[in-house]
């Protein structure tokens, strides 16, 4: 019994030692090479093992997807390690890059070395090829390309380099010729690269073409929109870093490198933002022109560009002048799902011909407006142009002299504007025709909004010229929108400024009392003089 127990114990220990030895068996692949050239070449690596074993080696070929390949050949595809002699073997790899192989920009090409040991198992190591520049030519012409500024438009939700889906981005690029020769046929190209998907969100395309003389510079603004016109689908976009690449490629016009292509490039990082809860409007449409009293068809898309599904979404459409205050139920939207909406608006007959702006706001299930982290609300403005078949606004004007009327002094006229129409109307006021007799004219109110039948007073102040005299005219124009409703002529009489020692009418008001006392004193003085003369004669 003891012998059997001892044998079992011995077997267990032996198995444990074997497993420990097997688990510690490793293959090591080392090389001083970090990257491989894009042209044919060779490199060395060392295979090491702490076990006596046979190791198989291989490197699969690489294809560019267009029928061109890179082929690898190893000096030894099978090696034997005898740790009692040497635990490592040096292997040389030759590789041939087939002519025409396309190393695509921002794509990684790597040689994968596979090692499989008869004891140690598998080990791998990769050797990356050098990355390609965005430029396909050297820069013998000494072009300089610089991204000077990047920002979103005012109707976007992002800011500078931080963008949301459906934002419009503007990039200002400067191209400068710092060389000694003119550059002809310069082609400016750009694209937007997604570092997460390793794809071009917007494929590289030509923006402009021009010549640039030595010492000169060109400034171009590139505009793109993060919408469904991109080459990458909206639902495939992810939060994170995107890179805007731009390059200028031209032909050197003269000198040592005449006829050669020259290229310079620059890039700028942007970040696509993704909120948890954010629903926005897109592709809003309204008729080019709508008539008064007609129906206007409003439509658009509602997009959930947040990471979470949303419930009970609704819209509010508002314009005070048109009397529009509508609510549209949208319902539920999953993340990066959209739906469209349509609304028929009945326009009043008695509105002014002009451009109206509808405010469309997106609300969540808690009756709150959707906002991003910068507190920008999901709210859009849609222009609605109204023209034709509109009732004409009406008004009447009366005017009276309030004060003044003398040359060289201020004159105030009170005008009463009355809405004689059947609807509320907004008016703007202008004064004209006064420059012959007044140096300036002002209104205490330049615009009014009056209900039907309502009237309001407006004061007109004129600085009357010193040489003005007699009957003079001015006109008070009343406009509704851009339409002239009333042009009312008003006649005023300007009198000569009367002499006054006291800044007013010499014989008016309190001056009469003063002059009475003065006249009485004058009479007394004359009587005293007369009496004195008579006494002196006696």
Image (tube, helix red, strand yellow):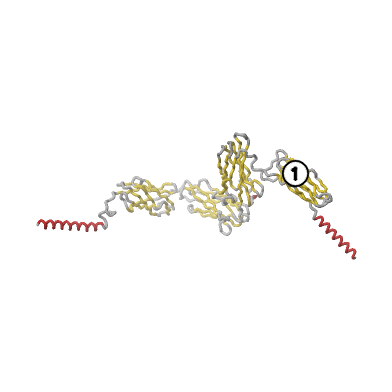
Q: How many marks?
A: 1
Q: Is residue 466 left or right of residue 20?
A: left
Q: Is residue 85 visible?
A: yes
Q: Is residue 429 left or right of residue 20?
A: left
Q: Quadrant of the N terminus?
A: bottom right
Instruction: Give the answer, above or below, for where 78 lies relative to 525.
Output: above
Q: Depth check: 245 or 165 in front?
A: 245
Instruction: Give the answer, above or below, for where 413 lies relative to 248.
Output: below
State the SS at label 1.
strand
Q: Quadrant of the C terminus?
A: bottom left
Badge 1: residue crowd in 10 Å (few <14, some 14–19, many ≥20): some
Q: Is residue 488 visible?
A: no
Q: Name the residue beneath numbered marker 1.
A: 43
Q: Quadrant of residue 92?
A: top right
In this view, which residue lies farthest toward the bottom?
Answer: 1
Q: Position of residue 487 (x, y in %)?
A: 38, 47
The residue sitting at 62% across, 34% down in the picture is 256
Q: Position of residue 128 (x, y in %)?
A: 71, 46
Q: Position of residue 214 (x, y in %)?
A: 57, 37
In this view, which residue lies farthest toward the left?
Answer: 538
Q: Position of residue 131 (x, y in %)?
A: 68, 44
């Amino acid at each position: 019994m003891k012998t059997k127990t001892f044998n079992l114990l011995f077997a267990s220990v032996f198995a444990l030692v074997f497993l420990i030895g097997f688990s510690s068996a490793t293959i090591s692949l080392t090389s001083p090479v970090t990257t491989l050239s894009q042209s044919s070449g060779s490199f060395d690596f060392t295979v090491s093992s702490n076990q006596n074993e046979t190791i198989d080696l291989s490197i699969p070929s690489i294809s560019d997807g267009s029928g061109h390949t890179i082929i690898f050949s190893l000096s030894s595809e099978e090696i034997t390690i005898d740790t009692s002699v040497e635990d490592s073997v040096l292997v040389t790899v030759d590789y041939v890059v087939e002519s025409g192989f396309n190393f695509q920009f921002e794509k990684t090409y790597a040689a994968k070395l596979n090692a499989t040991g008869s004891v140690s198992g598998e080990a791998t190591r990769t050797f990356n090829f050098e990355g390609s520049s965005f430029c396909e030519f050297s820069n013998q012409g000494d072009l300089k390309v610089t991204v000077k500024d990047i920002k979103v438009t005012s109707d976007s939700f992002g800011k500078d380099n931080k963008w949301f889906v459906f934002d419009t981005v503007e990039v200002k690029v400067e191209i400068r010729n710092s060389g000694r020769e003119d550059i002809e046929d310069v082609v400016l190209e750009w694209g937007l690269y997604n570092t997460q998907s390793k794809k071009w969100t917007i494929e590289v395309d030509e923006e402009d073409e021009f010549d640039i003389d030595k010492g000169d510079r060109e400034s171009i603004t590139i505009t793109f929109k993060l919408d469904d016109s991109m080459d990458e689908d909206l639902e495939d976009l992810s939060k994170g870093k995107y890179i805007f690449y731009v390059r200028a490629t031209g032909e050197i016009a003269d000198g040592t490198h005449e006829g050669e292509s020259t290229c310079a490039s620059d890039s700028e990082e942007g970040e696509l933002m993704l909120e948890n809860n954010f629903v926005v409007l897109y592709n809003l449409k309204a008729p080019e022109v709508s008539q008064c009293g007609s129906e206007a068809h409003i439509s658009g898309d509602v997009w959930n560009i947040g990471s979470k599904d949303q419930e009970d979404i609704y819209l509010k459409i508002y314009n005070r002048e048109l009397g529009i205050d509508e609510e549209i139920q949208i319902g539920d939207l999953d993340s990066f799902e959209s739906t469209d909406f349509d609304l028929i608006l009945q326009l009043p007959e008695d509105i002014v011909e002009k451009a109206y702006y509808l405010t469309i706001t997106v609300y969540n299930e808690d009756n709150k407006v959707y906002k991003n982290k910068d507190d920008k609300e999901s709210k859009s403005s849609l222009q609605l142009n109204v023209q034709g078949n509109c009732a004409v606004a009406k008004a009447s004007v009366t005017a009276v002299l309030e004060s003044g009327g003398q040359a060289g002094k201020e004159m105030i006229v009170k005008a009463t504007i009355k809405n004689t129409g059947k609807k509320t109307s907004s008016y703007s006021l202008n004064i004209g025709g006064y420059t012959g007799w007044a140096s300036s004219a002002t209104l205490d109110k330049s615009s009014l909004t009056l209900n039907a039948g309502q009237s309001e007073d407006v004061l007109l102040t004129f600085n009357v010229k010193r040489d003005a005299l007699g009957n003079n005219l001015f006109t008070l124009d009343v406009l509704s929108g851009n339409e002239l409703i009333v042009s009312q002529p008003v006649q005023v009489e300007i009198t000569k400024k009367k002499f006054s020692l006291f800044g007013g009418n010499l014989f008016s008001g309190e001056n009469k009392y003063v002059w009475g006392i003065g006249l009485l004193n004058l009479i007394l003085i004359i009587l005293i003089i007369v009496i004195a003369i008579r006494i002196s004669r006696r």
